[in-house]
Image: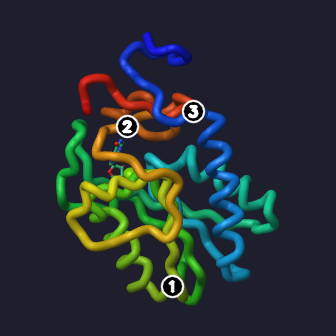
Amino acid sequence: MTAGSPDPHIDILFTEEEIAARVSALAREIVADLPRDFLVVVILKGSFVFAADLIRALEKVGASAQVGFITLSSYGAGTASGGAVTLTHDLVESVAGRGVLIVDDVLESGRTLAFACETLRRRGAASVRTCLLLDKPDRRAVPIEADYVGFRIGGEFVVGYGLDLAHRYRGLPYIGILRGSE
Ligand code: IMP
Ligand code: MG
């Protein structure tokens, strides 16, 4: 077992403390650029833990976020992106004329983020910014970059802090690499 890790299958990549420090720094970065009226659009499910911490960090630096949720899916039960992105649960809020901050967990091929940006722009959002917890730049298939990134990592499959493998591990307070997936 890795020191500090309660799960023998996982090597810790970012600790709870490292994540908390990075989320606070991101909030300070983001708040300087945000329009007064903005909607945080959380892409479920993977980013719900990150988004919960981020909106509280934003509040601490003076930005009160309104929050909406959208569920997009590109993965099956495995660790390889399937390609086509489907919208399985839509936003309730209208984005027309509003500043939007999309929050997602991992930017990998870029298909999910490109789909989300395009969808919200088509609906008339005044501005669309993007905040990603993790960026895997080596795995990009679509030319898209995030405005704000928590951590850049390699191509390894990671779990914890909201991220799952076949619906497991979301509740881990740290981000870790599954042994044997590197
Ligand atoms: P993309 O569409 O290929 O950019 O994939 C992004 C989506 O794949 C993210 O929103 C995640 O839900 C999922 N994903 C990508 N890499 C990982 C990972 O390492 N762990 C868990 N989910 C991942
Ligand atoms: Mg996701």
> Residue under circle 1?
125
Residue drawn at the location 54% of the way across and 32% of the way down: 174
Image check: 172 left or right of 1? Answer: right
Task: Give the amino acid type for the residue marked by disc 2 in the picture.
Answer: Val
Residue drawn at the location 57% of the way across and 44% of the way down: 49
> Residue under circle 2?
158
The mark nearer the N terminus, 1 or 3, is 3
Q: Nearer the viewer, mark 3 or mark 2?
A: 3
SS label for mark 2: strand
Q: Distance of mark 1 from mark 3, alpha carbons?
A: 35 Å
Viewer-proximal residue, 83 or 33? 33
Q: Distance of mark 1 from mark 2, alpha carbons?
A: 32 Å
Task: Give the amino acid type for the residue marked by disc 3 in the picture.
Answer: Thr
Image check: 44 left or right of 9? Answer: right
SS label for mark 1: loop
Viewer-proximal residue, 45 or 24? 24
**Label 2 CB less than 8 angstroms from ligand 1:** yes
- The spot of residue 163 in percent (x, y) is 43, 40
The mark nearer the N terminus, 1 or 2, is 1
Q: Distance of mark 3 from mark 2, alpha carbons?
A: 13 Å
Task: Give the amino acid type for the residue marked by disc 1 in the picture.
Answer: Ala
> Residue under circle 3?
15
Residue drawn at the location 52% of the way across and 30% of the way down: 171
